[in-house]
Image (cartoon, helix red, strand yellow):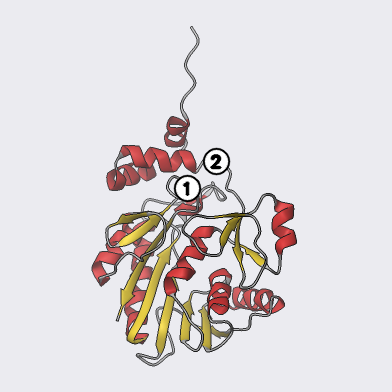
Amino acid sequence: MALDAPSPDQVGEATTPSWIWERLASAWGPGEAEAFLAAALAPAAIGMRLRPRSAEMGEPVPGIPGAAWATSHAAAAAAVPGAVVMDPASTAVAAAVQAEPGMTVLDVAAAPGNKTGALWDAMEGVGHLIAADRHLRRTRDAAARLGRLGMRPHWVIADGAQPPFEPGSFDRILVDAPCTGLGTLRRRPEIKLRLEPAAPVALGAVQRAILEATLPLVGEGGRLVYAVCTVFPEETVDIAAEFGGRPPGDLPGRVWGDGLLLGPHLTGTDGMFITVFDR
């Protein structure tokens, strides 16, 4: 007797380590966990961030200004330097910062620099943009790549948990924190096999230390945006609740706790969690 083929949802669940499935089902319910894992089996479309004054190209991403889907790898390559290959979820993160010309802005854990470039463009190269990262090689690579596109933030080698800056010295801060990366499963399927069950808690401790160190650096009336390309509660809603975040407005996705969730099953993008801290 022939057996029915499994649905995409069932395949996603069956090919995912049980502990990941259980964490997601507990956080969201089985239906959304299945939808996320099924969407993570599909190939990721090629996202682009359109730079200011560039020609319109690709298919606009609803609700994310400046984000578009490329029609092919060739089209994405031809768009440079008027556009940068970048998932729309990352473009949404930069948009949430609301950086403006003349501001003093800090990008923490900035390499490889995609979001740094978005902040530079939002500031129109006017003001002070400091990009900090603890890894020398990655920082050099990011600086060289952005430099070729005419973007020249001030790069600093610094640990986000021990930033060498004065309290209250920034109008905007972006903390694109180190994380488990589960939101990038479509392009990095090996993540689900490499991660250990203790990883979300361990990374949550790192993220917490970075926020404790960087929140005091925001000046009065300023803003810090915390983002991670993962979806485990220990790295997302738990962090936002502990520090008093709120969901950013005017972006697609769904409110989850004190933040906003984007994902392949919701927005067609990478999985991303964004929360905002106003001072």
Residue drawn 28% across the image and 62% down it: 258
4 or 189: nearer the viewer: 4
Residue drawn 64% across the image and 72% down it: 53
Q: In this view, does 66 lie to the left or right of 249?
A: right
How many neighbours does mark 2 have within 10 angstroms: few (below 14), some (14-19), or many (20 or more)? few
**Residue tagged 2:** 42
Q: Which amino acid does label 1 sit on?
A: Pro
176 or 88: nearer the viewer: 88
165 or 7: nearer the viewer: 7
Marks 2 and 1 close (CB-CB < 8 Å):
yes
Q: In this view, does 35 lie to the left or right of 22?
A: right
Q: Is mark 1 on a helix, strand or loop?
A: loop
Residue 174 rendering spot, x and y as whole percentages: 44, 75
Q: In which quarter of the image is the C terminus?
A: bottom left
Q: What element carries label 2?
A: loop
- The answer to whether one can see residue 135 in this image is no
Numbered-mark total: 2
Residue drawn 35% across the image and 90% down it: 168
Residue 88 rendering spot, x and y as whole percentages: 53, 59
Classify residue 175 by image quadrant: bottom left
Q: Is residue 42 left or right of residue 256?
A: right
How many neighbours does mark 1 have within 10 angstroms: few (below 14), some (14-19), or many (20 or more)? many
Q: What residue type is labelled 2?
A: Ala
Residue 188 rendering spot, x and y as whole percentages: 55, 50
Vertical comparison of 240 with 171: above or below? above
* Mark drawn on residue 78: none
Residue 93 rendering spot, x and y as whole percentages: 46, 66
- The answer to whether one can see residue 100 in this image is yes
Classify residue 214 by image quadrant: bottom left
* Mark drawn on residue 264: 1
Mark before the other along the chain sequence, 2 or 1:
2
Q: Distance between the residues labelled 2 and 1?
A: 9 Å
